Image (tube, rainbow, N blue to C red):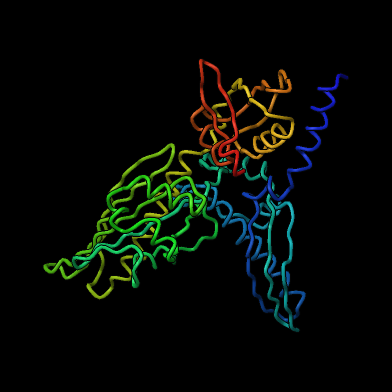
Amino acid sequence: MTMIKQFVAAGFVAAFACLSPAQAQSVYTVDNVSVDATDQTAAAARDIALAAGQKDAAVRLLRRLTPKSHHTLLPELGAERIARLIASMEILSEKRSSTRYLADLSFNFKKENVRRLLQNLNIPFSETISKPVLVLPILEAAGATNLWDEPNPWRDAWRGIDPIDRFVPLIVAGGDLADVATISVEQAVANDLDRIAAIAKRYKVDDVILVHAVLVQDLAAGIPRLTVTVQRIGPTVDSTVIESFAGTSRHAVGELLAESALAIAEGIEEKWKRATRLEFSEKSRLSVQVPLADLHEWIIIRKRLIEVAAVQHIEIREMTRTSTQVVLHHLGDPHALSVALAQRNLSLTKEDDFWIVRRMNKANN
């Protein structure tokens, strides 16, 4: 075995060692499952609680992976069917009395079994979690436009969105003095790209979503109305959508803002799941070159490739000290693969008819 082959072999071992089970299965892990049951004995209460916890975790997982538009198609799973999906359970904390059992649980699910279930049901699903996205909530009401000043009930509405089980983690800008100095409300409304890039850098994100809400009172109908311009700005995306919402009463503005923020967040989530859905009917192979500075860089890149759900197999064709030629066996088309790789800080580009994979923001990751 040549020296370079020895390096490669060592690199493979190190790459797998760096990939912990938690990283590989994070999408299929459901945490913070709280159970509380009472029965004639603590043991009986425990059995009831754990069974309820398994069902709750399974429902949460399936709803997490699939678009909301398909949730009504998800089946009611029995205990035996759920048990076949679960790989392991961890009791994070527990309390018990003679008749009551309370616990916080964490479940790891078997990826292949869950995949098979959803495929058999013909329900689309995604396993690609987006990088965090920064949200700047701008509220225009009664002649004033507000981003950072308190109160800002529109920002409060976005802060109130439950982050559990989200595929697109949303960071709501805090509004401290550094934020105020980085971008003003006028600059945000004017889409000042330099200032938007600066606030993105401050929060260490690629994409920023401006949610500019205009609130008016419909005096004739006696209800509030909200028009929201949703603009997503980033290195690879610049999209704008306008949404309209109506409240039930002029005194229920807070409810309108909360419901509108949640609806927009769910829309962002739905769009992401559609863009990253796993197309098992479309299995492809893509020959790519990976430029390398050293062996350590290959270890990092290979680890990240393994973590991408759309990548089924990495076939190494040639490796030198400066590059690796591989064939990626993957699901979906190159565009979908590119989106998935970007979430692991890898870029997929075509240069002179050759596909190239590189690390993104190499200085920061």
Q: At 56% from the left edge and 21% from the top edge, which residue is drawn?
A: 355
Residue 28 spot, x, y in % from top left: 64, 50
Return the residue found at the far top: 353
Picture layout, residue 268 above or below residue 279: below
Q: At 31% from the left edge and 48% from the top edge, which residue is drawn?
A: 191
For the C terminus, the image quarter is top right
Picture layout, residue 238 above or below residue 255: above
Question: Nearest the camera: 310 or 231?
Answer: 231
Residue 9 spot, x, y in % from top left: 82, 28
Question: Nearest the camera: 251 or 108?
Answer: 251
Q: Is residue 57 left or right of residue 200?
A: right
Task: Tell me where residue 311 sits by quadrant.
Answer: top right
Q: At 68% from the left edge and 65% from the top edge, which residue is drawn?
A: 105
Picture layout, residue 338 above or below residue 50: above
Residue 246 spot, x, y in % from top left: 25, 62
Residue 168 spot, x, y in % from top left: 49, 50
